[in-house]
Image (cartoon, rainbow, N blue to C red):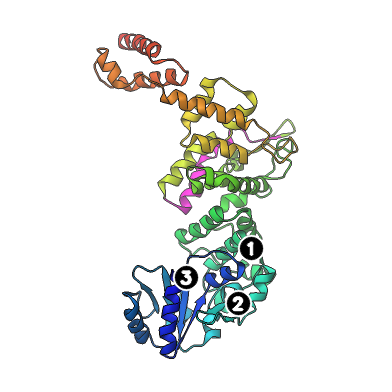
Amino acid sequence: MSTQVAETIASRVRDAGGRVFYVGGFVRDRLLGRDNKDVDIEVHGITPDKLFSLLSEIGEPVSFGQSFGVYALKGEDIDIAMPRREHAVGKGHRDFEIEVDPFIGTMEAARRRDFTVNALMQDVLTGEVIDHFGGREDLEAGILRHIDAETFVEDPLRVLRGAQFAARFGFTIAPETIELCRSIDLAPLSRERVFDEMKKALLKAARPSVFFNYLREMDQLGVWLPELEQTIGLEQDPVFHPEGDVWVHTMEVIDRAAQVRDETSDPLAFMMLALTHDLGKIVTTEFVKGRIHAYEHETKGMPLVESFVRRLTDDRSITGYVENMVPLHMRPNVAAYSKPSVKSTNRMFDAAEAPRDLIYFAMADKPVFSGTDEFSGDSEFLFERLEEYKRTMEAPHVMGRDLIEAGLEPGDYFGELLEYAHKLRLAGIDKDLAMKQVLAYARKFRKK
């Protein structure tokens, strides 16, 4: 276990005149009673060369550069660091001048951290908690508070970290920290860092909306999430959306989606679908005969959706999923009410990259005019039709080799024949009858 390795290192360091502390999120989560497998320790009171020598007696040490004072042991899941001073020399996340100082003391070592709850230190051997900035009190009160205004603003990522910590752990961000975050420019951040913090909120928070609502309160949506900002105040038909504007609706949807994300084929892509599904209302919302409508927002808004997702990631599994599913997102709820033919629901599921996820999304995007908090469509009907679709796809069907065996010469027209065969398959036509119809279609096709 990593804690046992930490204790071994701490014993060697103590014998050499130094001291080792658990630091950061490990201490925070331990005090909260949460499991955290990311063990971070900080070594005080000995030189970097001495530390490297001691680590060599325990295992095979790896140094990530003496100037950074960061080490690891091969085969062990533990991060080892020495205290250091950091000074921003630019606006980028790598633009820091770092000075390792093993004798800086615990207060100055903790001062460089972001929030008081993350500045807590715990002696590995004695269990003594070192708290220079009131982190334990803030932890008990569930408050995120910055430590030092001058150093906090040097890393703009801390704005996003604060929002995602609040979402994941149910913290409230202190008013003075919110005010400070308003003054920080997020533009220098890389999209990888931005998306990584957003991903943690989407995948680990029970209510991801907290992350986005804090960014809104900090006036920090505009640089990276401008489309979301445009949904604020964008009205919806109160008959179908009594909850409020598109922003409020989207926040409710992502929170409901979080309840079922682990049931889906790709939880992150699913949550991105929930976040972006109604961006099209930005360009389609209009008043028609006294009512608010957003006709075809699921398709006309795709340029906005694509721009939003691709600004944050090039991951094709995410971009492909979202770009496939957003245009389909309204169809399950319509089907849940209208109870269309099997052929119709087969086509719907066949168009979806993740058919089951489409149903789970419908449950998150539920119409709420029923006045209840339950899915007001017929989810049982949708799941039954999904099983029907699966049976359809498992049944024998017309394939290219069947056409060749029937005497047809392969050619460009085969694609159109197979597309026709697939439509017959989705309509539930058995293979023998479908084969006859495809061959008849081929004869007409060749005459043309």
- Residue type, mark 2 in image: Ile
Left or right, 239 with respect to 262, comes to right
Quarter occupied by the C terminus: top left
Which residue: 47% across, 76% down?
Answer: 41
Looking at the rendered structure, the secondary structure element under dot 3 is strand
Based on the picture, tell me whether residue 298 belongs to the magenta stretch.
Answer: yes
- Residue type, mark 1 in image: Met
For the residues bearing labels 3 and 2, Cβ distance under 8 angstroms: no
Viewer-proximal residue among 217 and 205: 205
Select label 3 or label 1 by which is in front: 3
- Residue type, mark 3 in image: Val
For the residues bearing labels 1 and 2, Cβ distance under 8 angstroms: no
Q: Mark 3 highlights which residue?
A: 39
Q: CA distance from mark 3 to mark 2?
A: 22 Å
Range of residues picked out in magenta: 292-314
Looking at the rendered structure, the secondary structure element under dot 1 is loop
Q: Mark 2 highlights which residue?
A: 147
Which residue: 63% across, 24% down?
Answer: 338
Looking at the rendered structure, the secondary structure element under dot 2 is loop
Q: Name the quadrant containing residue 225.
A: bottom right
The prevailing secondary structure element of the residues shown in magenta is helix
Q: Which mark is residue 348?
A: none
Left or right, 123 with respect to 438, comes to right
Measuring from the top left, give residue 81's x and y in whole percent: 43, 77
Based on the picture, tell me whether residue 379 belongs to the magenta stretch.
Answer: no
Q: Mark 1 highlights which residue?
A: 218
Q: Residues within 10 Å of mark 3 (few under 14, many from 20)?
A: many
Whether residue 161 is situated above or below residue 378 in the rendered picture: below
Measuring from the top left, give residue 399's x and y in whole percent: 33, 21
